[in-house]
Amino acid sequence: METVAPPKETSKPSKYNIFISHRLEDRSIASAASGALRLLSKGKLVPFVCGDMPGGTEWRDWIYESIEQADIMLFLYTDESHDWMWCFFEIGLFHDPKETKARPIICLKDPSIEALPSPLEKYQAYDATEEGIAKLLEDLLFKGEFTNQDRVNKEVFANDSYALAIQDFLNAFKQLKIESEYFVRRAVFNLEHVN
C-alpha cells in the first residue's frame, strides 16, 4: 500500500507591510489610513507612511527601502488637478514588471473623480465614501483579497473601532476638500462708500 504525503501548507506571513503613497498635502488622510489599518488589523498590517519617518532620516532612502519591503501599496488619489509625478514614481518602483507575481496596488480615490489616471486605469478603485471605505476594509482585512486569501482579521466587523475608522477616513477626505475650497472661493467687500 502506497502512502501519499499530505500537501505542503504554505506558510503565511505573520505581518504584511503596506506602503501608503500620497501627496504631502494629503498627510492627514495617510495618517488616518495608517492608524485605522494598524488598529483594525490587530498589528498584522504594518503601514509605511512618511509621517512615521524618524527625524534626521534621508527620506529618499527611506522611501526606496519601504517600497522594497512593502507587500501592498495603498494609493490615495484626492484631486485630478494636482501634480502626481512623485506618487507615480513610487508606484513605478513598487510595480516591477520583471516580477512574476505582481504585488497588489489598492487605489482609494475622491468620489468626485471619474477615473484613475492612465498609468493606473487598469485597477479597480474604491471611492472614499462610507460604502467604498467599508468595502476596502472588508476586502483587505476580512476577505484577504490582497493578502493571498489570508484573512487578516476575521472579527473586523465586531471591533468597536470599525465604524470609527471609517468615519476617520471620511473626515480626513472631507477636511481636505474644505481646506482646498477655502482658498478657491473668496468674497470681496468694497467699503469705500460706507459712512
Image (tube, grey):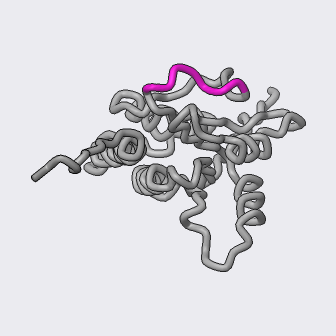
Residue 177, image x, y percentages: 39, 41
Q: Which residues make up the magenta segment? A: 112-118
Residue 122's place in the image compared with 13, above or below, is above
Placement of 128 over or under 27, stated as above or below:
above
Which residue is situated farthest in the left direction here? Answer: 195
Which residue: 77% across, 58% down? 64
Is residue 155 visible in the rendered structure shown here?
no
- Of 21 and 157, which appears nearest the observer? 21
In this picture, residue 15 sits left or right of residue 27: right
Residue at the image point whose x is 73% and y is 55% from the top: 69
Q: Give percent across and percent down for residue 160.
A: 26, 49
The percent coordinates of residue 62 (x first, y second) are 72, 65
Q: Is 38 drawn above or below residue 107 in the view shown? A: below
Inspect this view and state whether residue 15 appears. yes
Report if residue 3 lies within the magenta region: no
Q: Is residue 77 left or right of residue 98?
A: left
Give the main secondary structure of the magenta stretch: loop
